[in-house]
């Protein structure tokens, strides 16, 4: 099962991808998490990506495409994978279509987690992310069992650098301009499904399971 999670920043792509990964036993691949891990490790890629991420801009396609193509060629992706935050531009989508096409494969599902902009700004300020495993929480809606500590791995929970309200607004603009066209792209491929991302996390997940199990 090869799945793409589409949706605005903060729509809940990562939250749902994590649940799908656990339920179906396929890896969760988040380009944002990969960039943040690189930054934490002080790699050149991490330093390059940070410049764009901090401004709410997209990291250039040439830094992103090869990374994902290499990642999905690894053994643990044999039975499928979930892409969270990739593709985000038409050239990235073309790169993915081509890479899979060479293997005689294609994506199975593109799931658009739909949340209006108004809800997003509110969500982001309450988000806390685990520095260690990437799990996300919300201080009101989806709190961890112990404040500031990840339920899954015990890692430290932090507010992401790009979750400041000004940066969130920029990320939303970039989303509408560069990423939203992918909804048409995957509608044309016949694999687009939309879920209502304003519902509670469990209900969104139930909608996704219905799509994946149909
Ligand atoms: P990335 O890390 O992918 O960020 P994003 O797309 O902006 O999305 P988020 O991770 O912020 O949100 P999400 O949809 O995963 O929501 P979450 O589940 O956390 O990318 C960051 C940056 O990296 C980009 O800006 C760009 O610079 C760069 N980048 C990454 N990929 C790239 C690419 N392919 N090309 C170029 N650049 C790239 O949920 C949000 C909050 O809401 C949480 O607090 C959560 O607990 C809460 N929540 C979730 N679901 C619900 C619910 N149903 N009800 C109530 N609250 C909920
Ligand atoms: Mg995310
Ligand atoms: Zn964790």
Image (cartoon, rainbow, N blue to C red):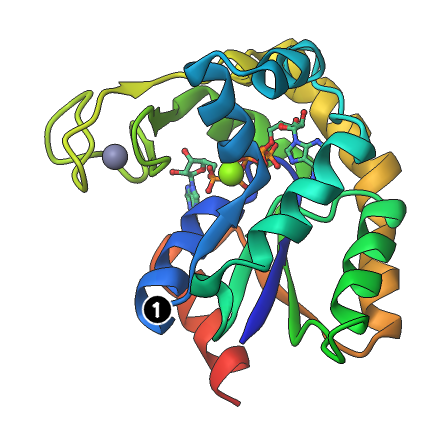
Q: Is residue 46 visible?
A: yes
Q: Is residue 12 visible?
A: no
Identify which residue, 116 or 86, lies in the foreground.
Answer: 86
At which x and y percent is residue 59?
Answer: 74, 25
* 153 over 108 or under it: above or below: above
Q: Residue at x 58, y 38 (%)?
A: 31
Residue depicted at 62% across the width and 47% down the height: 115
Please identify the quarter of the rendering in which residue 189 is found.
bottom right
Where is residue 21 drawn, in percent x and y?
Answer: 38, 61
Residue 17 horizontal/vertical position (percent): 46, 55
Q: Quadrant of residue 202?
A: bottom left
User: 103 above or below 166?
Assistant: below
Residue drawn at (29%, 40%) of the image: 142
Please tell me whether residue 95 is drawn above or below residue 149 in the rendered image. below
- Answer with left or right where residue 78 lies relative to residue 171: left
Mark 1 residue CB less than 8 A from any atom of ligand 3: no
State the SS at label 1: loop
Residue matched to label 1: 25
Residue at 33% from the left image edge and 38% from the top image edge:
135
- Exactly how many numbered labels are in the figure? 1
Furthest toward the bottom, the residue is 214
Q: Quadrant of residue 62?
A: top right
Mark 1: few/some/many CA within 10 Å (<14, 14-19, 20+): few
């Amino acid at each position: 099962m090869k799945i793409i999670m589409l949706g605005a920043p903060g729509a809940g792509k990562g939250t749902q991808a994590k649940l799908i990964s656990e339920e179906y036993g396929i890896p969760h691949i988040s380009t944002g998490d990969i960039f943040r891990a690189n930054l934490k490790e002080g790699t050149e890629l991490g330093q390059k990506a940070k410049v764009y991420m901090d401004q709410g801009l997209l990291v250039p396609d040439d830094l992103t495409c090869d990374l994902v193509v290499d990642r999905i060629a690894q053994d643990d992706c044999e039975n499928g994978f979930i892409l969270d935050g990739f593709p985000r531009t038409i050239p990235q989508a073309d790169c993915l279509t081509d890479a899979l096409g060479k293997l005689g494969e294609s994506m199975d599902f593109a799931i658009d987690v739909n949340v209006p902009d108004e809800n997003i700004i509110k969500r982001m300020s309450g988000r806390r992310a685990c520095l260690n495993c990437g799990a996300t929480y919300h201080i009101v809606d989806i709190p961890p069992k112990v404040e500031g500590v990840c339920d899954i791995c015990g890692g430290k929970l932090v507010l992401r650098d790009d979750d400041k309200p000004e940066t969130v607004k920029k990320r939303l603009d970039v989303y509408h301009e560069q990423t939203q066209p992918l909804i048409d792209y995957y509608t044309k491929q016949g694999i687009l499904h939309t879920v209502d991302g304003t519902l509670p996390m469990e209900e969104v997940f139930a909608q996704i399971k219905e799509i994946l199990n149909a």
